[in-house]
Amino acid sequence: MEMEIKLDYADVNWQFVSETLKRVGMAYGEPAAHKKAFENSRVTVFIYREGQLIGFGRAISDDVFQAAIYDIAVVPEYQARGIGKIIIKTIMDKLSNCNFILYAAPGKEGFYQTLGFRKMKTGMALFLKAPQMKERGFTE
Ligand SMILES: CC(C)(COP(=O)(O)OP(=O)(O)OC[C@H]1O[C@@H](n2cnc3c(N)ncnc32)[C@H](O)[C@@H]1OP(=O)(O)O)[C@@H](O)C(=O)NCCC(=O)NCCS
């Protein structure tokens, strides 16, 4: 499948990003908030097919030691075609000297395991919406 990988966010439709995150069951907010989050990230990746955004992701990082991956999403019609893998690998290539951490959506751990990620034994999180995150299966 022909697709284009873009690292810049100049042409991104943030309304579509927000709607996609909602559609795939991930946390979402106002389009302007996503724009700011991506702009403030170290690496951003957007996958296009025939001019249409079909997947995206981002990583925050110190660019030396550590990176954290967020907002990895592929629109449902294009899932299971290797696009998620391309997004993660593109991020990892750009920050190849870094350790990566992330929290997988419950049920999506296997996707990250195919990319070499392993479950952490001592991962800790302090979420703003702690009860909701517990309810959704992210914390004990
Ligand atoms: C999770 C997601 C990003 C994966 O992207 P994708 O394009 O569908 O996945 P890919 O086709 O690149 O899959 C890569 C590999 O992971 C495997 N995989 C994908 N989803 C998986 C899952 N839920 N469990 C186990 N393995 C999975 C695939 O079988 C494939 O394996 P292979 O390399 O051995 O062939 C995508 O399905 C998605 O956007 N889901 C909804 C949003 C979401 O949950 N995002 C993650 C938040 S942490």
Image: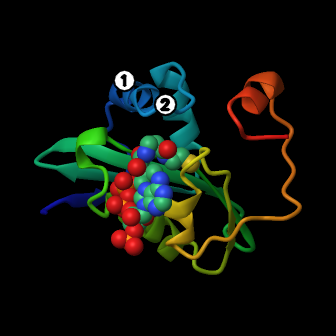
Identify the residue at image location x=57%, y=29%: 27
Residue topped by disc 1: 15
Q: Does the residue labelled 2 lie within 8 Å of ligand 1?
A: yes
Residue 138 drawn above or below residue 102: above
Identify the residue at image location x=52%, y=42%: 38
Q: Which amino acid does label 1 sit on?
A: Gln
The reply to whether residue 11 is in sight is: no
Q: Position of residue 127 (x, y in %)?
A: 81, 33
Q: Position of residue 77 (x, y in %)?
A: 23, 42
Q: Tell me which label, 2 or 1, sits earlier in the chain.
A: 1
Q: Quadrant of residue 86?
A: bottom left
Q: Where is residue 20 in the image (x, y as percent from the top left)?
A: 38, 31
Mark 1 Cα shell of 10 Å, populated few (<14), some (14-19), many (≥20) = some
Q: Quadrant of residue 97?
A: bottom right
Identify the residue at image location x=62%, y=71%: 117
Q: Distance between the residues labelled 2 and 1?
A: 16 Å
Residue topped by disc 2: 25
Farthest bottom residue in view: 97
- Marker count (numbered): 2
Mark 2 Cα shell of 10 Å, populated few (<14), some (14-19), many (≥20) = few
Residue 7 drawn above or below residue 73: below
Q: Is mark 1 on a helix, strand or loop?
A: helix
Look at discs 2 and 1 and give the one toward the viewer.
2
